[in-house]
Image: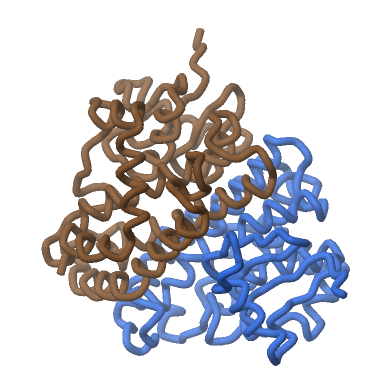
Chain colours: A brown, B blue
């Protein structure tokens, strides 16, 4: 009999989009299992069964998805919308809920842009097969898009008074913004170092999240998968101008 | 004194992401004004003021955004999450709300992919400056991504029993899927014609939505902006293989 409150289903070897959910579950000290990491038949095959199974009434499009009792929820931001309420990581009033979700959807947009710097043509081709396009896409990403997004979050922090995006209380989008900073530092150490001078509040939020006891314990544990060349954030010297 | 229930803020000359919101407001017969289309100072400058104004406590990242009383909501899917409840375009139970929102977020992902077929490198360059990359990106989009997304919605319709994604009742995501079909037909008439043979339920949903009295009246009105070479969907013969 399974009495775990939450089952997270995501690819077991990368942080990817699943990491935004893992961070929320970890910060809240939630009772969860990272299903695909169990390995064997109870791992990835169990995940695929929920994706493709004929009996699944409301199939998710792709991992990550969360199982909570009978409910299956796909799409990272939708999962966080659901968990925010239950884990105390979102405001209780409707306007606050919509606002934190709006910020999370802006993170979603940014994640696609970060991924596409190294894969501007297709995820079905290797980086080496689209290197020229990747260099150009990365150049424009760092010239226009990354500053626009990061300065937007800086501005939201200035308006809220910080230290978190909504003010004094942590919400799930703070954990996601922490993860964005982590990822950009991994993929673009030189570019990010220059950028960080312009976004001190975002950097301070990152540092504050990293020191939260449960987040710190998680980051130091084996549950935190290392960055690699297979996730959203990948390091290529040629792209880090 | 302004007594309009909803103010939509979006670029006045394109369908773009604003169209998903317009369709919901129109189908519901909601009392709204499409602010930027008023022209003059009360148009786009009024929109920019809400985006950049120092007094805006919770600024949206970009259009579209909706003003409802004092509430300002950005991000298309977040706007629909809010309107779904109020306009009777979403289920009343939490699981249903999360499900229709999950589907909408999958539409969001697809919209980015469609846009990037003609602008794989950057929105700051002309199509002509990235034509080779666009051709390749489009090839892979139609080989893998478009079929995966469209067949997913076909499968959801098969499971729900149709005619709508949630079954017998229309929800906001049905209007969005209608718009995806419209857009793909405009941008890729040949490719889409071939694709439609494999997604009869999606096509039937499109046709059914188009015939709904308020949608039909809207589509025939001047409020419906025509497709053009400036929106998400653009027609280039070289991309429509």
| Number of numbered discs | 0
Q: Quadrant of the C terminus of chain A?
A: bottom left
Task: Judge by depth and name the residue closer to the eye, A185 or A113.
Answer: A185
Q: Is residue B57 above or below residue A40?
A: below
Q: Position of residue A18 (x, y in %)?
A: 39, 39
Q: Closer to the camera, A144 or B178?
A: A144
- In the picture, measured across the screen, residue A106 lies left or right of residue A205, that is right
Residue A194, located in which quarter of the rendered image? bottom left
Q: What x and y, as percent, mark residue A197?
A: 26, 63
Residue plotted at (66% across, 58% down): B79
| Residue ranking furthest to the front | A161
- Front-most of residues B53 and A145: B53
| Residue B102 drawn above or below residue A50 | below
Return the x and y of residue B202 as percentages of the image width and height.
65, 58
Give the image location of residue A137, x and y in percent: 28, 72
Residue B166 shows in the view: yes
The residue nearer to you, when weighing A29 against B175, is A29
What residue is shown at x 59% (from left), y 22% (from top)? Answer: A69
Instruction: Write the residue at 16% across / 65% down.
Output: A240
* In this picture, residue A203 sits left or right of residue B92: left
Image point 63% across, 47% down: which residue? A96
Q: Is residue B193 visible?
A: no
């Amino acid at each position: 009999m399974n009495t775990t409150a939450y089952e997270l289903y995501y690819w077991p070897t990368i942080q990817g989009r699943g990491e935004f959910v893992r961070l929320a579950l970890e910060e809240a000290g939630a009772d969860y299992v990272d299903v695909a990491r169990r390995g064997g038949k109870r791992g990835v095959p169990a995940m695929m069964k929920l994706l493709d199974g004929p009996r699944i009434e409301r199939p998710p499009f792709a991992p990550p998805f969360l199982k909570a009792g009978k409910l299956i929820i796909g799409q990272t931001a939708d999962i966080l919308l659901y968990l925010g309420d239950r884990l105390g990581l979102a405001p209780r009033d409707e306007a606050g809920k919509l606002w934190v979700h709006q910020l999370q959807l802006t993170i979603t947009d940014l994640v696609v842009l970060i991924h596409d710097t190294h894969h501007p043509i297709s995820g079905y081709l290797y980086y080496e097969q689209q290197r020229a396009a990747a260099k150009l896409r990365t150049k424009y990403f760092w010239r226009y898009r990354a500053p626009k997004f990061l300065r937007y979050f800086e501005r939201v922090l200035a308006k809220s008074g910080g230290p978190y995006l909504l003010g004094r209380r942590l919400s799930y989008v703070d954990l996601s913004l922490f993860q964005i900073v982590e990822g950009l530092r991994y993929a673009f150490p030189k570019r990010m170092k220059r950028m960080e001078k312009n976004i001190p509040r975002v950097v301070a939020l990152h540092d504050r999240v990293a020191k939260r006891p449960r987040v710190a314990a998680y980051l130091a544990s084996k549950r935190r998968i290392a960055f690699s060349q297979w996730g959203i954030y990948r390091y290529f010297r040629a792209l880090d101008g």
